[in-house]
Amino acid sequence: MTKEEVIKDLGRIFYQGGYTTEKYTEAMLEKEKNFNTAIGNSLGIPHGIESMRGEIKHSGLAVFTFPEGTDWGDGEIVKLVIGVAAIGNDHMATLARIADACESEEKVDEILKMDVDSVYELFKA
């Protein structure tokens, strides 16, 4: 999948789950134009631009895994993609939780082997 396809799928999950409006997908795509959200350790964390925070109804995460990796642009290959829709102060706390859990490529590889329930427990607030 392309980065744009992944982000559109994340947006669809957020919207269909009642976490965001449909506009939030565009906010994530816009953020990606200005800032590549691949942050190292085979991790991508797409999230919306600041001005579209009002499009978030409830905080939530959507997690995709790509054990073989997917091209995130600028030479970055990601294996774990965590979409973030977070209200207010939840945003920074959520990013910090993700950074702690994914502090090394080895930790990301461990997450790739976890079942859904274990991933949920790892990232729940």
Image: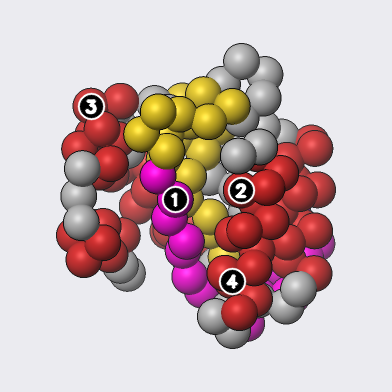
Mark nearest the camera among 2 and 4 is 2
How many angstroms separate mark 2 from mark 3 (CA)? 23 Å
Q: Please tell me the numbered disc located at residue 2.
A: none
Percent position of residue 17, x then y: 54, 80
Q: Please tell me the numbered disc located at residue 6.
A: 2
Residue highlighted by disc 4: 14
Q: Nearer the viewer, residue 32 or 65?
A: 65
Q: Earlier in the sequence, mark 1 or mark 3?
A: 1
SS at mark 2?
A: helix
CA neighbours of label 4 inside 10 A, class few (<14), some (14 to 19), many (20+): many
Lateral position of residue 125 relative to residue 84, left or right: left
Mark 2–mark 1 contact, CB under 8 Å? Answer: yes
* Residue shown at the point (21%, 43%) measured from the top left: 113
| Three-letter amino acid code at the position of disc 4 | Phe
Q: Earlier in the sequence, mark 2 or mark 1?
A: 2
Say how many tags the image has: 4
Residue range in magenta is: 48-65
CA neighbours of label 2 inside 10 A, class few (<14), some (14 to 19), many (20+): some
* Residue shown at the point (59%, 84%) measured from the top left: 18
CA neighbours of label 1 inside 10 A, class few (<14), some (14 to 19), many (20+): some
Q: Earlier in the sequence, mark 2 or mark 4?
A: 2
Specify whether residue 39 is in view: no
Above or below residue 37? Residue 41 is above
Residue highlighted by disc 3: 106
Q: Please tell me the numbered disc located at residue 64.
A: 1
